[in-house]
Amino acid sequence: MGPILIGAIVTSVSALFYGGYKLNKRRNQRLLREALRKKYAPDLPPLISTQTSRIVIAADSSNSDGSPPVKRTKQIEELNEKEYDDWQGRDEQRDVNIMQLRLILEDIISELPELDEEHEEELTEEERIMNLDARAEWIVENEDNLDEHATFVETEMVGSGIIVEETPPDNDDLDQRLEREGGKTGAVQISLAWDDYNDLDLHLFCPSGERIYFNNKESECGGELDVDMNVKPVSNNAVENVVWTKNPPKGTYKVGVHFYKHHKKRRTKKTTKYRLRVSIFGKIQEYSGMIKYGSAIQMVTGFTIGTETDLSKKYGEFS
């Protein structure tokens, strides 16, 4: 057997082994992705495709409106096993952080009476003001700690939200909820929906370094939280909305969800499933997830508008 033949055999065997390795790696990645989807978004239908793309709008896009390139963050279901283990470790550190800072709401607002069954659909102006005042009192006492926790969460580069492959999914009523509450639409729009009486809060980390949330509803960079629900448990089909109606700043955005207050109305549980819609220049992606009362703010997803030269977090141009 000549050296050429031996070389050919070795090459063929190596190719077979490599092909098997790649096939097994793809299979394991799919199994991990399916397991994570069942864990964090059990209501989603079975996985349709193993292929994902982080490009929302390509750099060479021929969009007639001149939209800049957009790229989203990597999500947990796109991680390999080691990367996911590392992410879990960081997630546990965030939960420890929120406990150490004593940001789990148990005192001021929890002492306020819940609505009784006969009047649960009615909320007087006096009751509404009482709850808003209680939240204002809480944030005055805890704003520094909440800012510290949010800054810690913002360092996360992997989103916890599970990708919804069919966007919008069947029976999605998010548009109807936004219309009901007077939510605006715009060039960049992030909407959060959930189906119980708990109080979840959107936290939007902006390229300017600002954070839009219930205590900072309008940012200097043009973003606005225009719908904020369930300070008092008034709805079991709630929605919140942050929007840039035009000229969103270039740079990196991150979307956080915080389980602010557990309401006991109608035996509402301490785990809430949510849906998050991100609309960027008309391109829509939805995510699904769950959050437990007492856990850290979740960094659900993020995205970058513009090129590498636009990634500075300093407040700058908005176009």
Image (spheres, grey):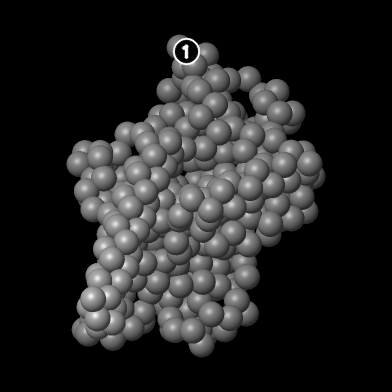
Question: Which secondary structure lies at badge 1?
Answer: helix
The answer to whether residue 105 is left or right of residue 21 is: right
In the image, residue 108 sits, relative to residue 10, either above or below, namely: above
Which quadrant of the rendered structure holds the C terminus? bottom left
Question: Which residue is denoted by mark 1 in the rendering?
Answer: 117
**Residue at 36% over, 67% down:** 54
- The residue sitting at 69% across, 47% down in the picture is 93
Question: Residue 165's x, y, as percent?
Answer: 26, 51
Tell me if residue 6 can be seen. Answer: yes
Horizontal side of residue 15 vs 275, given as left or right: left
Q: Amino acid at mark 1?
A: Glu
Q: Nearer the viewer, residue 120 or 62?
A: 62
Check the image and report above or below for 47 versus 246.
Answer: above
Q: Nearer the viewer, residue 62 or 15?
A: 15
Callout 1 crowding tier (Cα within 10 Å): few <14, some 14–19, many ≥20? few
Q: Is residue 237 above or below residue 97?
A: above
Image x and y of residue 60, in percent: 28, 86
Q: Is 247 left or right of 315, judged from the image as shown?
A: left
Seen from the viewer's position, the closer of residues 164 and 183 is 164
User: In which quadrant is the N terminus drawn?
Assistant: bottom left
For the point 30% across and 39% down, which residue is it? 44
Tell me the quarter of the picture where residue 64 sits.
bottom left
